[in-house]
Amino acid sequence: MPPAPQLLHDILDRAAEDDAHAVAVSGQGRTLTYGELVEASVRMAARLYRSGLRRGDRMVVTTGDGLAITLLVYGASRLGAVFSVLHEQVRGGPLEHVITDCEPRLLVSDDTAVADTAARHPVTFLRTEDLLRVALDPRAAAGPPPPPPGTLAVDPVSLIYTSGTTSLPKAVVSTHQQVLFAASAIQSRIAYRGDDIVYCPLPLSFDYGLYQVYLCALSGARLHLGTAAEAGPPLLRSLETSGATVLPAVPSVADRLAWLLRRGSGGAGTLRLLTNTGAALSESTMSALRSALPRLRIQVMYGLTECKRTAIMPPDGDLDRPGSCGLPLPGTEVFVIGDDGERLPAGEIGQFVVRGPHVMSGYWRRPELTAERFPRGEGLFPELHTGDYGWMDDEGFLYFSGRRDDLYKERGFRLSATEVEAAATRVEGVTSAAVLPPEGKRGAVLAVVAEISADEVRERMREQLEPFKIPRRCVRLDALPTNGNGKTDRKRLADLIERHPAAPALTEALQARLSH
């Protein structure tokens, strides 16, 4: 038996050894086999080496070209370098912050504005198209191969910048060992197959999207790189033309697919598996997907950037345990603690704590924040205090209640935006929902995409939730604004709500019913 992969690019090399002629990646008119992908990543590594990239150096990539990102990631791994993939729209102040924070050796992009930013820093700027041209040309003069960098499995391989309760994005440090453990543990649960076509409409700057690259290499599946535009109205046609069997989705993508299937006459019949993370799928969306695609199985997941994935449900496990986000990954542990830090028994709500090889190494150059979120617990390795709240049943299944920053207080009650949103999406006729917690003089606002009126949504929510938890104001929108990762963009939503005309006063009878 060959030795287990130690470094990130080992999984690509192993896939090519198993079947060099199998299609590895496709999309936007380009197709590469696993053998071709290996050769292209070697040429990419050589080109990056000639530009000065060495073991331990950082490389920042900001582009929407998924194939380029794939080759840059594997190329950096071959050199022992550390990559950070940013969304292609990261510009100005946020980009300045990343460059100042991680001090990269190379900055790769398609954009002249990024080149202008790079000129103000001691960083070498490279154009994506120039690198890609060299990597994809077998005739390109690669020069002598770089010397073996001596990379260890415990060396860092990536920095993932993530927002949160801090004012500026912070970078989660991941080693080769941690990435490989997380990807292998996820694959053991979702079981991609060698004949799968994984259609990814998510940007690879989103770690959920980037991990599709690793999961396909581990399974020998084909990754079809979609685009942000294809996640909208063309989604159903894109799934059909690519022959997709797997769709990694977030709620906005799954909601769109359900909407298209309701109004179409079939399609996407090859789709066998839909995975979801980022936020809970509504019951109406899952029901619509299963009705239109009887062979489709749905796997809901829960995770954080700091440990990649925390829990995964068995396929269609939500039918038996509604509301659960699954079992902890194999080889890991999740438990629930109270405010005093003591473990809580099954059924009691507290903060999730995660232990295992997938818990990342901490935050880049943030020792105080690392010590707060990654304290050392019952062993040599840090444990992750997630800031997420929920409970665990007697069989170890997790139930997510809300994030620390999603909890708010109104009318004397401590409430969870996640709980309110879930209740709204259980109302028939509601496709998706988002809550804006109170701010200043504005109370909590519920925004919904629904086929019924806002007042009807609030009225019917009384069957799902205690009346005091229902926001007094509900606004119906055509769609919830989303960010580049497909998650609800709360800032844009707040701007929309601010411009939205206030609803007329509720009738005294309805207000009385909702207040008691």
Image (cartoon, rainbow, N blue to C red):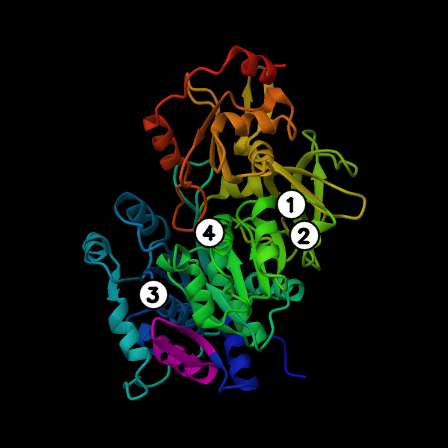
CA distance separating discs 4 and 1: 42 Å
Tell me which amino acid carries mark 3: Asp
Asked whether residue 38 is drawn in magenta, I would say yes
Q: Residue at x 30, y 74 (%)?
A: 132
The region drawn magenta spans 24-44
Q: Residue at x 47, y 48 (%)?
A: 252
Q: Which residue is mark 2?
A: 380
- Marker disc for residue 65: 3
- For the question of whether residue 156 can be seen, the reply is no
Image: 107 above or below 98? below
Q: Are marks 2 and 3 in contact (CB under 8 Å)?
A: no
**In the figure, is residue 291 to the left or right of 88?**
right
Image: 70 above or below 495? below
CA distance separating discs 2 and 1: 7 Å
**In the figure, is residue 306 to the left or right of 497?**
right
Answer with mark 4 or mark 1, whichever residue precedes in sequence: 4
Q: Could you say whether the residue bearing mark 1 is in a helix, strand or loop?
A: loop
Answer with mark 4 or mark 2, whichever residue precedes in sequence: 4
Q: Position of residue 388 (x, y in %)?
A: 60, 39
